[in-house]
Amino acid sequence: MTKLRGLLPTIIGLFCLNNHVLAQSLLDKRITIDANNQRLSDILKLISSKGNFYFSYNSNIIAYDSLISFSAYNRTIKQILDQLCGNQYKWQQNNNYVILRKATITPPVPVASPTPSAENYTLLPVTF
């Protein structure tokens, strides 16, 4: 019985480590997909099926009417999402889910140059 008590923390630690490793490796998992003239939502279903995970997203952010063609061979899920979604979406992994959100695109902030003042100019005499 005392041997089991000593092993219990080790078993719990290994279980937690295993879950952590599985969660970390989801976006690093390599898959191959080939989709021709399909909706983005269908391509996401194909990726989740091959990657053995689920996408979670608001259906209003996915363009249902446009058809796209997309191929990726032996690429990580993160690489595929980067290539497929670009900067339009951002994602977050949570256990066996990848949560997609519409990316907020912030406009570039113009950098204002200081207005020159009369103090900054040097007047040179001009001769003709």
Image (cartoon, rainbow, N blue to C red):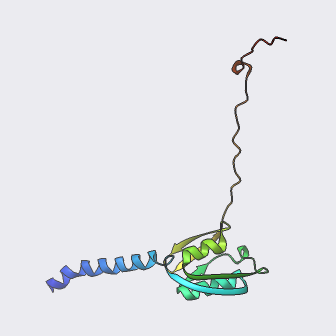
Residue lying farthest to the right in this orientation: 128
Numbered circles on residues, count: 0
Residue at horizontal 61 percent and vertical 78 percent from the top: 56
* Picture quadrant where residue 31 is located: bottom right
Q: Is residue 94 above or below residue 49?
A: above
Q: Is 26 left, or right, of 81 in this rendering?
A: left
Towards the viewer: 104 or 60 = 104
Taking the image as shown, residue 43 lies to the left or right of residue 123, namely left
Place of residue 93 in the rendered image (x, y in percent of width and height, measured from the top left): 52, 73
Q: Quadrant of the N terminus?
A: bottom left
Can residue 89 be seen from the camera position used here? yes
Residue lying furthest front: 128
Which quadrant holds the C terminus? top right
Front position in the image: 54 or 87? 87
Q: Name the residue rendered at 68%, 67% in the picture.
A: 88
Asked if residue 100 can be seen in this view, the reply is no
Percent x, y of residue 58: 67, 75
Residue 38, compared with residue 17, is above or below; it is: below
Q: Position of residue 80 (x, y in %)?
A: 59, 76
Give the left or right position of residue 62, taking residue 55 as reference: right
Q: Is residue 23 left or right of residue 33?
A: left
Which quarter of the picture shows residue 78?
bottom right
The percent coordinates of residue 54 (x first, y second) are 57, 83
In the rendered image of this protein, does residue 119 appear above or below residue 104? above
97 or 35: nearer the viewer: 35
Residue at screen point 45% across, 74% down? 24
Residues 105 and 32: in front is 32
Residue at 77 percent across and 11 percent down: it is 125
